[in-house]
Amino acid sequence: MGCRIGVIADTHGLLREEVKKHLQGCDRIFHAGDIHTPFVVEELNRIAPTCFVRGNADKEWAETIPLTQDIDDIGIRVYMIHNQKQIDRALESYDLIIYGHSHKYEEKHIDGRIWLNPGSCGPRRFRLPITMAMLYIEDDGTIRIERIDINAAEQKPDTEITADAVKKYLPAIMKEIDKGVSVEQLAKRFHLSKELSEQICRLYLTHPGVDADGIMSKLGL
């Protein structure tokens, strides 16, 4: 009979109705991290048994969620992690590697295995598309992946600020952080989402010496 698995990442506390509709009828769901709230865990498990990994935005409440998952009960072997840059093992024995973090959909076929980032189906980041993936595994181990764009014809940015504008404002934002300005004040002052303000603050404070280009790179912009 094979199986149908919904693959998502970077929901950041937002589980869209359209995403839930696509997930209905799935045998399993894989979530590649940055879940953000236990509400998402509960909602997804009500739809289908869900396998999660913990992302960098998943804090104290998510301490029991593993950083990686090794899945081998679906006819293929899957390795799942939030940030592919943190992979610290050989992956020759895996058929599929699933990751998130960048908010950008990616599907690569390398040396007989597939690398899949379903993108983000949570809050929109700039003009990046809102995406997820559907994984189909046949009884003979054949893998088929379908990219799903959420409201592709209707998507609008969650914020009008562009990546170029963020880069322009970053030196001023960094100075404000040095002064102890709060995340909420930064968001209001520079017309950013609270989530983006939090990301910039975290990157700046946890990477001493990082410059504006470094922050843009780590944001995936």
Image (cartoon, helix red, strand yellow):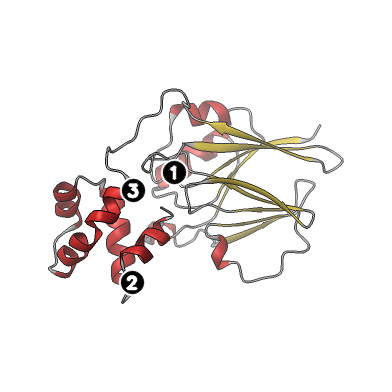
Q: Residue furthest right?
A: 140
> Which one is earlier in the sequence, the residue at label 1 or at label 2?
1
In which image quadrant can residue 24 be found?
top right
Q: Which residue is mark 1?
A: 11
Foreground pick, 120 / 111: 111
Crowding at mark 2 (Cα within 10 Å: few <14, some 14-19, many 20+): few
Which amino acid, mark 3? Ala
Q: Are marks 1 and 2 in contact (CB under 8 Å)?
A: no
Report which residue position mark 3 lands on: 163
Q: Residues within 10 Å of mark 1 (few under 14, many from 20)?
A: many
Q: Which callout, 3 or 1, points at the residue further toward the start of the chain?
A: 1
Mark 3 residue element: helix
Asked whether the residues under the numbered discs 2 and 3 touch, taking CB atoms below 8 Å apart as contact, a structural biologist would say no
Residue for point 27% across, 62% down: 201
Looking at the rendered structure, the kind of residue marked 1 is Thr
Task: Residue 152 in the image: state x and y as whole percent.
Answer: 48, 27
Q: Is residue 123 left or right of residue 102?
A: left
Spatial separation of the CA atoms under disc 2 and disc 3: 18 Å
Identify the image quadrant of residue 159.
top left
Q: Residue 210, which numbered label?
A: 2
Q: Nearer the viewer, residue 44 or 171?
A: 171
Q: Position of residue 196 (x, y in %)?
A: 30, 51
Task: State left or right for residue 206 relative to residue 28.
Answer: left
Vertically, is 183 above or below 12? below
Point out residue 10 in the picture as x, y percentages from the top left corner: 46, 47
